[in-house]
Amino acid sequence: MKTIDEMLNLDLLTADQHHQIGAWIERASSPEEILQMPSSLWQAVERASAVMGIDADLTRPPSLDDGGADLS
């Protein structure tokens, strides 16, 4: 839900889309049920995800450095 909230705050989803997507997710009892969301809502999420670069974040190799930890 945090991601779709951010999409709304960035004006990448309309308030109605945000409401419909959130309601769908709330009603779903499994990931498979979420995947049954209407295509128009999926398309809105996909467009917003592309603008936010979410796919790039998910496909980036993990950093082996945690920001300065002593690994010795």
Image: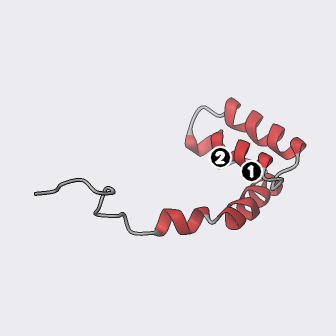
Q: Is residue 45 left or right of residue 15?
A: left
Is 16 or 69 nearer to us in this picture?
69
Q: Is residue 27 above or below residue 70?
A: above
**Mark 1 touching mark 2, by CB under 8 A?**
yes
Label 2: which secondary element: helix
> Residue at point 31% right, 56% down?
66
Residue 38 in the image: state x and y as whole percent: 79, 50
Q: Is residue 59 above or below residue 45?
A: below
Q: Give the class, few, some or many, for how many residues have Cα within 10 Å of label 2's Cα (few <14, many ≥20).
A: few
Give the quarter of the image for residue 61.
bottom left
Residue 18 in the image: state x and y as whole percent: 80, 43
Q: Is residue 27 left or right of residue 19?
A: left
The residue indicated by pointer 1 is 7
Is 66 or 12 nearer to us in this picture?
66
Q: Is residue 69 left or right of residue 39?
A: left
Q: Give the class, few, some or many, for how many residues have Cα within 10 Å of label 1's Cα (few <14, many ≥20).
A: many
> Residue at point 76% right, 33% down?
23
Q: Is residue 56 above or below residue 29?
A: below
> Residue at point 79% right, 47% down?
8
Label 1: which secondary element: helix
The C terminus: image quadrant: bottom left
Q: Is residue 57 left or right of residue 50?
A: left
Residue type marked 2: Thr
Is 43 or 69 nearer to us in this picture?
69
The residue indicated by pointer 2 is 3
Q: CA distance from mark 1 to mark 2?
A: 6 Å
